């Protein structure tokens, strides 16, 4: 995991929940953690990490994840054992 991915992980777990994290940075982080990422229907992104599966909606037309998505990612990463 490089420095930018580490900063993205810290941003995901920052309080209060942030809504300005770039989606491409999140996908980069998930890849660095070893997650399997696949495109679902429409804007759905399927992610599997350490046996934990989740589906997220890629933000559009914005390029940043919203607070709800960040909160869901936080829960997903905790369930997969990947905290800050």
Image (cartoon, rainbow, N blue to C red):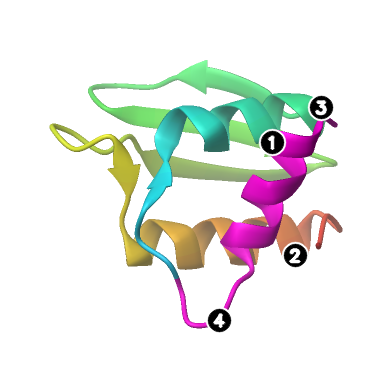
Residue 1 in the image, given as x and y percentages of width and height: 85, 31
Residue drawn 31% across and 57% down?
A: 66
Residue 79: x %, y % from top left: 75, 62
Report which residue position mark 3 lands on.
34
Point out the stretch of residues depicted in magenta.
Answer: 1-17
Residue under pointer 1: 4
Label 4 belongs to which residue? 15
Which of the two labelled residues, at mark 3 and mark 1, occupies the earlier sequence position? 1
The crowding category of the residue bearing disc 4, from other C-alpha atoms within 10 Å (few below 14, some 14 to 19, many at least 20), is few
Mark nearest the camera among 1 and 4 is 1
In space, the residues marked 4 and 3 are separated at their CA atoms by 25 Å
> Crowdedness of circle 3 by 10 Å Cα count: few (<14), some, many (20+)?
few
Q: Nearer the viewer, mark 4 or mark 2?
A: 4
Q: Please give left or right for residue 38 compared with residue 57 in the image.
A: right
Q: Residue 57, percent across and down?
A: 33, 40
Magenta run includes residue 74? no
In three-dimensional space, the C-alpha distance between marks 1 and 4, rounded to whole angstroms, equals: 19 Å
């Amino acid at each position: 995991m490089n420095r930018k991915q580490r900063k993205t992980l810290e941003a995901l777990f920052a309080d209060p929940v942030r809504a300005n994290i770039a989606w491409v940075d999140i996908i980069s982080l998930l890849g660095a953690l070893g997650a399997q990422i696949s495109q679902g229907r429409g804007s759905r992104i399927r992610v599997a990490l350490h046996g934990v599966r989740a589906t997220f909606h890629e933000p559009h037309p914005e390029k940043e994840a919203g607070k709800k998505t960040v909160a869901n990612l936080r829960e997903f990463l905790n369930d997969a054992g990947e905290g800050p």
